[in-house]
Image: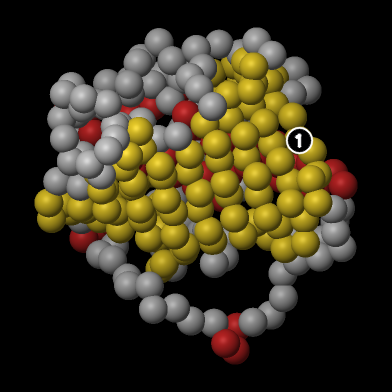
Amino acid sequence: MAYFERTGTDTFEPSRHVGGAWNTDEQHIAPALGLLVHVLEQDRDARRDDGLLVSRLSYDIRGTVPMAEVATSVRVVRPGRTIELVEATLAHGGRAVVTLRAWLSRASDTAAIAGSHLAHVPAPDEVPAWDPTTVWPGGFIASVDVRRQQSAPGRAVVWARTSEPLIAGEDVSTLARTAGMLDIVNGMTVRADPRDVSFPNLDLTAHLLREPVGEWVGFDATVSFGATGLGLTSSVLHDASGPLGTMAQTLTLRT
């Protein structure tokens, strides 16, 4: 069963696999983030044939969305021959729920100078399996295969993958599928019991060094709580080839 089924040119119906963790009657926002990348890539490829690469995904999460049909739209904010800024929006009932702004750049050969000091992490087969449903309810959490090596509450190496398609009957890029997993990490190494403290994220921004490869997405994750109701989940992203980029999520803390 896919996470979404297309119901029209720009509309999609969620399946039970999209059920949320904070509230199972609401959508987990993770699959929607992948859906927005998919529609953004479709728009890009309909407009041009040079396959601009996505270097940044910056999402603002404006609110919750019920388990109901959603609509998507895409617009070019800053057009260009080699660089574009593109915005994609997911809405329900005429209300914008998530907005994605992505920078796209033309690919070039920089292999001779490629390199990073971002540390590698153990591969998925070196990290023990962990059942996230012991902490969280909901269809999305139940649909994901998770490996976790936790060193302390709020500090862990996490790998996640899913065998479920993002959209029924449609080819989806590895980037879109990866983007649909990114939001999971905020709940994979909790600092506090979510029955006592809620810590939903208001946004998610990922900066990428390259396109992802493989079925697993990895996180070298740190969760931090401040003393005035603010929090941060920060991660170094990984895939089968090594470090992929970085990611941050702003948290609002509620006791």
Quick one: quadrant of the C terminus? top left
Is residue 46 rendered to the left or right of residue 193? right
Q: Residue 137, percent across and down? A: 27, 21
Decide if residue 94 is on the left or right side of residue 178.
Answer: right
Query: Relative to residue 215, is residue 253 depicted above or below?
Result: above
Q: Is residue 76 left or right of residue 21?
A: right
Query: Mark 1: which amino acid?
Result: Val
Tell me if 37 is positioned left or right of 226 in this view.
right
Disc 1 marks which residue?
74
Badge 1 element: strand
Rendered image quadrant of residue 172: top right
Return the residue nearer the eye: 24 or 91. 91
Where is residue 45 drawn, in percent x and y?
80, 48
Q: Quadrant of residue 202?
A: top left
Q: How many marks?
A: 1
Foreground: 36 or 204?
Answer: 204
Query: Going 58% across and 49% down the picture, which residue do you hit?
Result: 57
- Residue 206 percent location from the top left of the image: 50, 53
Determine whether 32 is above or below 70 in the image: below
- The image quadrant that residue 243 belongs to is bottom left
**Can residue 189 be seen by looking at this rendering?**
no
